[in-house]
Structures are given as structure tokens and as C-alpha cells.
Amino acid sequence: MKLWLVRHAQPLIAAGICYGQLDVAADAGATAACALQLAAQLPHGLHVVSSPLQRCEQLAQALQGLRPDLTYKTDARLREMDFGRWEGLAWQAIAQSELQAWTDDFAHYAVGRHGESVSAFMARIAWAFDALPATGDTLWITHAGVMRAVQLLSRGQRHIASAAQWPLEAPKYGQWQTVDLPIG
């Protein structure tokens, strides 16, 4: 059994902006190119689930246009991490003291004062991960943070104690990876 993880295409927002759950669109051309490449790779009979943020739904709709057998549903649990009042700010504009507070208490610090902690984010993604169908492959159209959380979950790591444990690598915009899951 495989979990396909696809990252949305390049969002239409300036580089260096913290955008987390901001509902920004993705580049239409890059979305179409990703859908075309992905449509040729995906097996039939996939369960397809998308983040409800428009940059992901654009890709889900483009993919369904090419592969009508791949109908999708949205799941709010697949949204990117909520960065609270940091969303829409340039990362450089966020006070160094706030970034340091997050790093110092990476698991529990509510980013942007009212956003999610990494522990809450991991719990949300684990809830969706644990609900994966027992049979058949699944495709999630989602975000880099979700993909990083799945890296940890697929290795059995449910909690994170420090920023050093958080994976740095994630597929680039419009790219994907697969995770082999045990059957049953």
C-alpha cells in the first residue's frame, strides 16, 4: 500500500512570505504541468484527498480533468500549519525573539501567538494518517509541512521534542513522493 504525497504548484505570493493557511492560488501553468505529469504516473483506483486550500484544490481539479477516474474529496486536516498572526508577513519581519521562542519550545509554542504548535499540527496530521483506508493506495494533495509530518509518522514518530528533529527536506512545488505503508 502506498501513500502518494503531492505538493501544490508554486503559490502566487512573493518569496519570503509566511503563508501557511492563507488561501492563495497557485500558478495555473505550473498546476497544469504538474497534473499532466502526475496523471501519467498514478495507478487506477486511488483514493484522492486534497487540502481545501485553493492551491491544492486547483491541482485536484486539473488532475480530475485529465483522469476522471480520480475523483477527490477535501479534508481540512490536510491544510498547512496555522502560523497565526505571522501569516502574510515576511519571515524577516517576524521578531527574532518570537522565532527564538518557537525554536526553544518547538513542540508546544503556538506560532504567531494564536496559531498551531507543532504538537497540535502533528496530532492533526496523525489523525488523518491513522484514518487512511486499509486497502488501496491513497493520494494526498497537500503542503510541505504535511509532507514533513508524514515523514515522521511513517517512521513511527508521533511526537517531536526539538526543532532538530523536524525534517528539512520536502518535495519542491508540484513534486511528489510516495510512502510505503504496511498492509492491514
Image: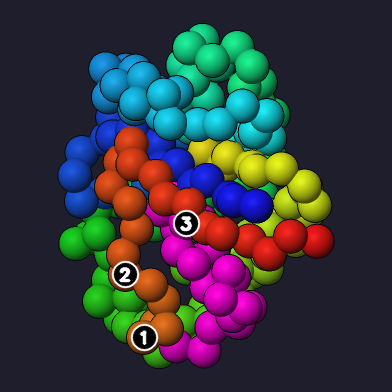
Q: What's the residue at 58%, 50% (across, down)?
A: 3
How far from the left and from the top, in percent, is residue 150?
54, 63
How far from the left and from the top, in percent, is residue 21?
49, 45
Q: What's the residue at 41%, 24% (across, down)?
A: 40
In the image, is residue 141 above or below residue 131? above
Q: Which residue is mark 2?
A: 168
**Magenta part of the protein: which range?**
142-162
Q: Which residue is mark 3?
A: 147
Q: Sequence-wise, which precedes: disc 2 or disc 3? A: 3
Q: Secondary structure at mark 1?
A: helix
- Cα gap from disc 2 to disc 1, whole angstroms: 9 Å
Q: Which residue is mark 1?
A: 164
Is residue 135 on the magenta stretch? no
- Cα gap from disc 2 to disc 3, whole angstroms: 11 Å
How far from the left and from the top, in percent, is residue 131?
78, 54
Total marks in image: 3
Q: How packed is label 2: few (under 14 Cα within 10 Å), some, or many (20 or more)?
A: few
In the image, is residue 107 above or below residue 33? below
In the image, is residue 3 above or below residue 182? above
